[in-house]
Amino acid sequence: MPTPRALTTGALGVTTLLLAAGCTGGAGGVGGAEDDRLAVLASFYPLQYVVEHVGGDLVAVSSLTPPGAEPHDVELSPSQVRAVGEADVVVYLSGFQAAVDDAVAARTPEHLVDAARTTAVAEHLGEADGHDHEGGDPHFWLDPTLLAALAPDVAAALAQADPAHADAYTAGAEALLRDLTALDEELATGLADCDQSVIVTAHTAFGYLTERYGLEQVGLSGLDPEAEPSPARLREIRDVVAASGVTTVFTEALVSPKVAETLAADLGITTAVLDPVESQVDPEVDYREAMEQNLVALRAALGCS
């Protein structure tokens, strides 16, 4: 859970964004006295990445989840909740962050993108008919093709809020689609010829990645990154490691590595970091670079040629 200090910093960042974009009096901040960019709020980092690349210099983007914070249980300050109603565009994933869902319901932003309603994403989340996906795996962005599918919906919302630049937003979405398609090809090629296919992870956040690239995920715990694995589960993991020739237990930057490190030491294997890219842990490493780092780690662990 984010620390109070991190939440305060995030709230100040959102307030600064809205002031800079001339958006303190409600939606429609285009034409503010000091800055005519659209003020856009994303609920967490991968969605922020999409907005930044689709909107470019025409948008001022802030995340409701502070950088480096765990997004699952984020809490919003009163100023962040108000900002949800004041931003020109809000991009979020319903069912993933309860506080954000509540803020959206309370403030009803004029221009709203719910990633769970993007057709390709909804089909994978089991939401094509509008059913609640809460409790399922939300980490769709670990399949770059699904993150790319969000770009046209973001472009459409930006264009509704700022029709004068509709063509620029469409072009931004097309450029991001090309880039994420190239990333998908890099991952597919890099993981096509490997000695192993099983990865052991701290929690089961990587289902979309493993499904896309023909791997099998075995998690120490389930979707809750804070859950402790039971002794029975650890025995199961030991059997998987022995049977599959697993060489590495993957940890995460935002999850305590203690259990994974202890298990790896007991089994005589190593640990490495695999990033679920829920948050931007390093400000110098963006989504694409984090996924490329994941590819390097996976190739080393799986013996890929």
Image (tube, rainbow, N blue to C red):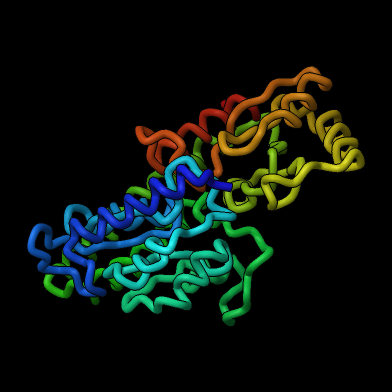
Q: Residue at x 63, y 32 (%)?
A: 194
Percent x, y for residue 195?
Answer: 68, 29
> Is the residue 303 above or below the residue 74 in the image?
above
Is 220 displayed left or right of 284 in the figure?
right
Q: Nearer the viewer, residue 71 or 85?
A: 85
Q: Residue placed farthest to the bottom in the image?
A: 129
> Is the residue 146 above or below the residue 297 in the image?
below
> Is the residue 176 above or below the residue 36 in the image?
above
For the C terminus, the image quarter is top right
Is 253 displayed left or right of 46 in the figure?
right
Q: Residue at x 60, y 35 (%)?
A: 252
Percent x, y for residue 96?
Answer: 57, 62
Percent x, y for residue 175?
Answer: 27, 54
Q: Residue at x 50, y 46 (%)?
A: 4
- Asked which quadrant contains residue 284, the reply is top left
Percent x, y for residue 17?
Answer: 26, 55
User: From this viewpoint, is residue 118 visible?
Assistant: no
Q: Residue at x 40, y 36 (%)?
A: 289
Q: Residue placed farthest to the left in the image?
A: 33
Q: Nearer the viewer, residue 70 or 193?
A: 70
